[in-house]
Image: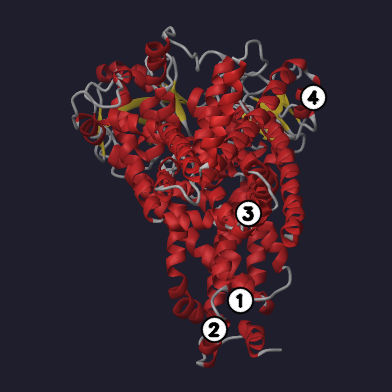
Amino acid sequence: MSDSHVAQPGAWQQFWQSKRNRRRVTLTVKFLFAAVTLAITLLPILFTLSSAFNGGGSLSATRLLPAKPTMENFRVILVENDFWLWLRNSATVSSIAAVLSGFLTMLTAYSFSRFRFHGREHLLLMILIVQVFPSLLAMIALFSLLQQIGQYVSFVGLNQLGGLIFLYLGGAISINVWLMKGFFDSIPREIDEAGMVEGATHWQIFWKLLFPLVRPIILVIMILTFFGTFGDWLLPRLMIQDADKYTLMLGLQQFIVNDYGNNWGTFAAGAVLGAIPQVTVFIILQEYIVGGLTAGSVKG
Amino acid sequence: MTKTEAFHKNAGSLSLGRIGLVLLGLIIFDAFAMWFIYQMLGDGVWQLAAMVGAVALLVNGIWLHPRGYPLRWMSPGFSFMILISIFPILMTIYYAFTNYGTGHILTKTQSIAVFEARTYLPDDANVYDYTVFQGEDGRYALWLQSQNNAGTFATSDGTLVEGIGPLDADGIPETVANYRRLTKAQSLRAIAELADMQFGAAPNVVQITARPGEAAQLAPRFVYDPATDTLRDQQKEILYTADAERGAFVAADGQELIPGYQVPVGWRNFDRFLNNPSFRGPLLPIFIWTFIYAGATVLVAFSFGLAIAIAFGRDMPFGRFIKSLFIIPFAVPGVLSILIWRGLLNPLNGVVSTTLAEMLGQPIGWPPVFSDPFWVKVALIGINVWLVYPYFMLINSGALQAIPQDMYEAAEIDGANAWQQFRYLTLPLLLVGVGPLLIGSFIANFNSFNTIYLFNDGGPPIAGAATPAGHSDILISYVYRLAFGGGGGQDFGYAAAISMIIFVILLLFTLLQFRYMRIWEGVGENV
């Protein structure tokens, strides 16, 4: 017993001495680790995909490979439910909110980048501090704000898509202003000065000279804002009562919440369809997203 | 002064046409703002009116003052921010000191208006003989005749109708515009419906009385007297006095009129959870669980994300491809992921439970992630880690790449083993950048309402709590439950008071974050 105990480390050490062996072991361990983590990460998504194509549609019938693949669940969610209506509501709210927010962000960032004025640093800091308090915390006040405003201007009131858009605009001035300001800062001032020599106004310099240069960035910011809004569930839940004004997330949640057992397959189909746009865009914009996240970390 | 700065100085003074355009825009903006403020003051909504007024003044100042030019660009964005981000935060603080909630939703002005609109049938009311008419669209109207026999036509929605036809011997027309006269029998058949209706425009509103063929004029039931701040109930002859502490009109015998109105109540909401055991009872475990939930999520997700980032780092074949697969869960909207997990973890027929039953011989229904407080919490942390760790994987691999390779070579020459390299080189350097994001993520998860609410609605419920509360509720979902959860009504004031606790905690952590950033900045520069 003691012999083998002594001998084993010896053999192990010998094996470990070889760089090739060491690399092989490390790689094996890494691939095992990859398999486990990928399973944890992707299995829930694969199960959902499978449920979407599975006939029957009950929760208990979930298998990794559908027994008899069918499009029935997709037909039910698209034809017998209000999927398209919810999608249209979501797309309307998110796209208007994203375009307006993007525009406000651009104007604000341009001013921070190109002008020096009293209180500039304080305003920049204030943006960061206001960000800390999620709008969720003030949900009661937001609710009564919409209720009060809606009494006078009905299309931005409670239970109105306009009211939702209005609330999302409150978050337009966000960390994105900092990001956007950074991009404006990186555009040489000489471009502005060339415009000034030609007698262009600030608006013309902004719109004709600088905007084309930052257009790709602002597009990415708008797309990310769009999906941030698209994926929001809580504000619609608080502010919208009528089923015909549900956003997609709210509609799918209300659809599944009452009857998990029987609606599972249909919900899975809806979830797959609801996730496709964002997953596609995120994979295309991978570089930007990872870049944006790590820029935050590396710069601090 | 450079050419650019000189130009900026003059930016405000531009051509006359432009100034005219600015003025025109401001006039339209101000007209709208003033109309809005006027309406709101009429309803006693003075906080919002004051805030809109302040924003309008600010915008005017920025656009009229020459040095405000740079601020013009941000005035729309910041106006929204003040109105929709900052104002609600201030209002939440205000609500924490009021009785705002079920029965006290309205302002005092609105509450008085509600009572003044109520009517009753006085004993000595003006009485009329009526004849029923019915329009082509089925709506009813009355032809009313008083003692002196002058007839008037009163429709159910109070609109005036022209075109009264020729009167018969009793002074009643056959037709009025497109309304047709009903016979006695016809009107008797509709009497139940007619008895609930009111006819004519205010203040001459009549209702059918119990006596056949007789209608009487309704009188306002409550009369408000601003001098004494009282409401007089004309019907029962009771005087209700405004009680600024209870936020309602109260009779001498203590009876309150419903609905009441909003009033400041001082520290009463805070007093409840500080000194009342039945309110404090559920709050303490919720408070502790919120910290455990957010802390465990960040810690596990960070470690897991870091492990993956290191493992699939430089020399891993397909490393890039594998890492890009982690984008997928990150890209699925979180709401959908949580709802999917709720299905997969369903103890009775979810795939996790059934697989465990097959593989380990566990009974069906295990783990009880919906009914057992411990297992609910385990599941919630698990789900939240699943949602968050791809984020940490992505930022960690970015931060790892920023660490210069030659530092590891130097460490190797110094004889540092892998663990020492990680402990004394990788981790400290990584935390320079990622540290503040860890705190940021803690703050975000401190308020991750969706996971808690969508998975199990904060349940299972805590038995015997003064207000409904669940074992897996975090502070923010508890606030939601108090404010919108139904059950015992909406308690906005108390919910806002609890929001204040969250405010304070967030503020502390943000200060910590800012400090942390500065400290590590110094370290970063030394490296």
| First-in-chain label (2 vs 1) | 1
Circles 2 and 4: CB distance less than 8 Å?
A: no
The foreground one among A51 and B410 is B410
Mark 2: secondary structure: helix
Residue lying at 55% horizontally and 72% vertically, measured from the top left: A184
Q: Is label 3 or label 1 in front?
A: 3
For the image, the number of numbered tags is 4
The foreground one among B77 and B228 is B77
Marks 2/4: CA–CA distance: 60 Å
Residue lying at 50% horizontally and 77% vertically, measured from the top left: A206
The foreground one among B83 and B237 is B83
Circles 3 and 1: CB distance less than 8 Å?
A: no
Write down the residue under mark 3: B408
The x, y position of residue B18, in whole percent, is 53, 82
Would you say B100 lies left or right of B176 here?
right
Can you tell which quarter of the image residue A208 is in?
bottom left
The x, y position of residue B104, in whole percent, is 64, 30
Circles 2 and 1: CB distance less than 8 Å?
A: yes
Write down the residue under mark 4: B274
